[in-house]
Amino acid sequence: MPVNLALTPRSSLWTLRIAVVALAVLMGAAISAAGDQRTSTVMVVATTALGVAVAALVVALVVPSALGLTVVRVVTPAFVPAAVVALARDGGPWAVGALAVALLAAAIALGAETGEAMVQGSAYGDERRLPLKVPAALLLPIVVSWLVWCAAALAAIVLLCARQWAVGGALLAVAGLLTFALFRRFHRFSRRWLVVVPAGIVVHDHVVLGETLMVQTTNVRLCQLALADTQAADLTGPSTGHAIEVTVKEMVTGVFAATPRDPKGRAIHMQSFLVAPSRPGRALQALAAGKLPVG
């Protein structure tokens, strides 16, 4: 009998929790090993930075929420380069173990299952939140922005460990400003959902849409995987991969988010529209469970 090893949202969340605990232990041991031949400054700065990062993740994972998802997806991948730095500074086998666990934790943190578990944790009442894929055109800016932030933060920590107070402090200030600026932008992507509620379907996406779109159950004709030649209105960003097409009985109005070309947004009337959940198959199952017609 074939065994399904795919993580569910619940198991993904618990695996990430365990990985974070393992990371805290392994990184702490790697820092201790790397600091044996160095001054106490290294230990104080490095362990303080580790403590802040782990504390943020613990709070985010203990009470799952959309805000926690942003914290998890910003902070967890930063352990990968941090483990590389510890390995380069004689962190020994502890750093090797930390790097392996950090890679696993980052993959899980960025996975669709973790996203679903986290955003569902802050859902209101009887609603099912299904995260949407990031628009393809925004992936590169997100990655580059995160790399700049991560490089500034890690460089600041390394310089402070080396007692380069002026340069390290300046970089730390830059990292702090970037944290404030980028976190708000990144959080918008944690709040993009297709929501199944008793009254129907809600598309909550303030990146693509200027207003939340709601379609009542009685107005939904069919939900299905979109065909390649569909003429439905694209509300995906656009994003890559499979999309779900929702066809309605009576036309609904969607309002796109403001752009330099359309500063007040742009309204369109739709007989059908596309949304791109991170896991289309699970989204169709949720729609069917919500008594909506699925084909």
Image (cartoon, helix red, strand yellow):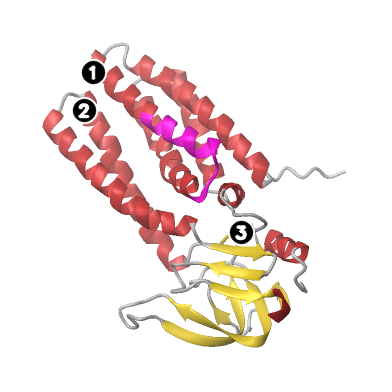
Question: Which label was assigned to residue 160?
Answer: 2
Residue 62 lies in the magenta-colored region: yes
- Asked which secondary structure carries label 2, the reply is helix
Residue at 17% in and 24% down: 163
Instruction: Read off the residue under disc 1.
Output: 41
Q: Residue furthest right?
A: 1
Q: Position of residue 9 (x, y in %)?
A: 65, 46
Residue type at mark 1 is Thr
Residue 154 falls left or right of residue 125: left
Q: Nearer the viewer, mark 1 or mark 3?
A: 3
* Quadrant of the rendered image containing residue 185: bottom left
Is disc 1 in contact with disc 2, using a CB cutoff of under 8 Å?
yes
| In the depicted structure, whether residue 215 falls above or below residue 189 | below
Element class at badge 3: strand
Gap in angstroms between the C-alphas marked 1 and 2:
8 Å
Residue 116 is tagged as none
From what the image shows, is residue 11 above or below residue 267?
above
The residue indicated by pointer 3 is 130
Q: CA distance from mark 1 to mark 3?
A: 45 Å
Query: Which residues fall within the magenta stretch?
Result: 52-66
- Residue lying at 47% horizontally and 31% vertically, measured from the top left: 99
Q: Amino acid at mark 3?
A: Leu
Q: Is residue 245 magenta?
A: no
Residue depicted at x 46% and y 20%: 94
**133 left or right of 137 in image:** right
Q: Earlier in the sequence, mark 1 or mark 2?
A: 1
